[in-house]
Amino acid sequence: MILLRADYNVPIEYDATGDERILNDFRIRASLPTIRYLLEQGARKIVIISHLGRPNSVETLADLDELEKLPNGRRKFSLRPIFNRLYEVLAEEFGENVDDFKQHFLMNFHTTPIFPHTRYGTPIAEADDDYKIEMLENLRFSKAEKQNSVELAETLLQVTGADLFVQDGFGVVHRAHTSTDEITRKMPSVAGFLLEKEVSTIAHVFENPEKPFVAVMGGAKISDKLPMIEKFIERADSVIIGGAMANTFLAFHGAEIGQSKIERGQEEIIADIEAKAKRKFGANFREQFLLPADFGVAKEVAKTAERREMAISELQLDDYILDVGENFSNYTSQVIENAKTIVWNGTVGMAEFANFANGSAQVAAAISRATKNGAISIVGGGDTSAFAMNWAWENPDLAEFSLISTGGGAALELMSGNILPRLEALPDK
Ligand code: 3PG
């Protein structure tokens, strides 16, 4: 009987009635190889545990009513919709219609969250039923999950009766929580395929990258990604900067960037980053530490805003930079295409607005061309992976990435050269 930790923390939206919509089921699909393997190896039953979001949490079963409810009376952040989606993607995986699949492949969802010291009756492993997969409710409804609690780990062991723990939630291995850390001390623990693939691909790239190695960085905050930027400067042959992060660099150099978003108070950090880039790349460091000089610009930050292309010198005081410009995209696409190793973290514009997704789409396309030519490519970070995944769905013939990581913070940690302690905790990782 297997206890499987997945990271089913998927983006989910609730409408006014409380009905939910899963915006991207990538992490659910990414867990299928491990589930399939365990079933094929004859696992009698798999109990899946995960968290979803950052819900409020309570101490005991008696406090359950304090958990947030949706207008339809259901619990907000319940894993039930994820369970339903898992049923659908498993049916698809086994090539069956979901109703037919449900007739012979039985799955069960446990609505009662698990709290330390609570007795839950017969352990799942000993129950006389034919369920192949069972899922427990969101672990984070219990305060003890984030406290890395010995008691909660013991209760999980009692509830499930599992004899093997499989950690496959790559996105969560940077957290020291009960279901990632303490649980590994309660039973033999191994890594699943997703975790194995993500860690070995990312580690390989940083230990032994084939050259030229190009890093593409975007997103808003320099401060969040500082160790990663430093790592990229140390390892990569070119670093391409886009997104609001680039605005902060440009503002530091006194450029007029209108109303564009920047991160204040980063002067010292930027001076330090650029000094490191100069040391690494030499006097012409701007050719390898690339900042945009033309942009997709608008008069407002809105989905429907009209895009204008302009050089930095043409920007007006009431303009907002919302994307990198076409010249920059064309130039950096060539740099990316000639690379043998590419890592991408952070969209280079407001990719959630169609008019300003062009720069990020061009990055995705150039990476795909390079990958088709034999390069290794990694896309990491929550928004960037979601963007690449959607772009790949829309452009199935063009898309090719070696790895679209399911990890947000965990990928960032690994790409920054940090070890993941919860991974080290797996004896047979
Ligand atoms: C993630 O989405 O990065 C992981 O699921 C971890 O979630 P957390 O940041 O809420 O711990």
Image (tube, rainbow, N blue to C red):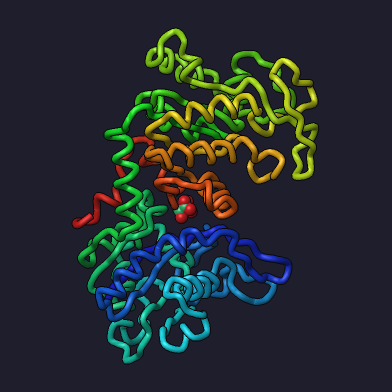
Q: Quadrant of residue 414?
A: top left
Locate residue 81: give its quadrant: bottom right
Q: Which quarter of the image is occupied by the C terminus?
A: bottom left
Residue at image location 73% in from the left, 67% down from the top = 16
The image quarter containing residue 251 is: top right
Q: Residue at x 47, y 32 (%)?
A: 337
- Does residue 63 appear anywhere in the picture? no
User: Of 225 and 385, which appears nearest the observer?
Assistant: 385
- Front-lying residue, 152 or 372: 372
Observer able to see residue 355:
yes
Quadrant in which the N terminus appears: bottom left
Q: Residue furthest bottom?
A: 128
Q: Is residue 83 left or right of residue 244?
A: left
In percent of width and height, residue 104 lies at: 42, 87
User: What residue is at 36 percent from the left and 64 percent from the top?
Assistant: 33
Q: How far across and how far down the image is residue 259, in percent? A: 74, 27
Above or below: residue 380 compared with residue 323? below
Could you say where residue 278 lies in the image, as x and y percent from the top left? 43, 13
Left or right position of 304 against 412: right
Q: Residue at 72% x, 40% y: name it.
A: 355
Lateral position of residue 321 relative to residue 208, left or right: right
Question: x%, y% of residue 80?
Answer: 52, 74
Residue 400 sits above or below residue 64 on the image: above
How many marks the image carries: the answer is: 0
For the view shown, which residue lies furthest in the top direction? 283
Q: Is residue 242 above or below residue 129?
A: above
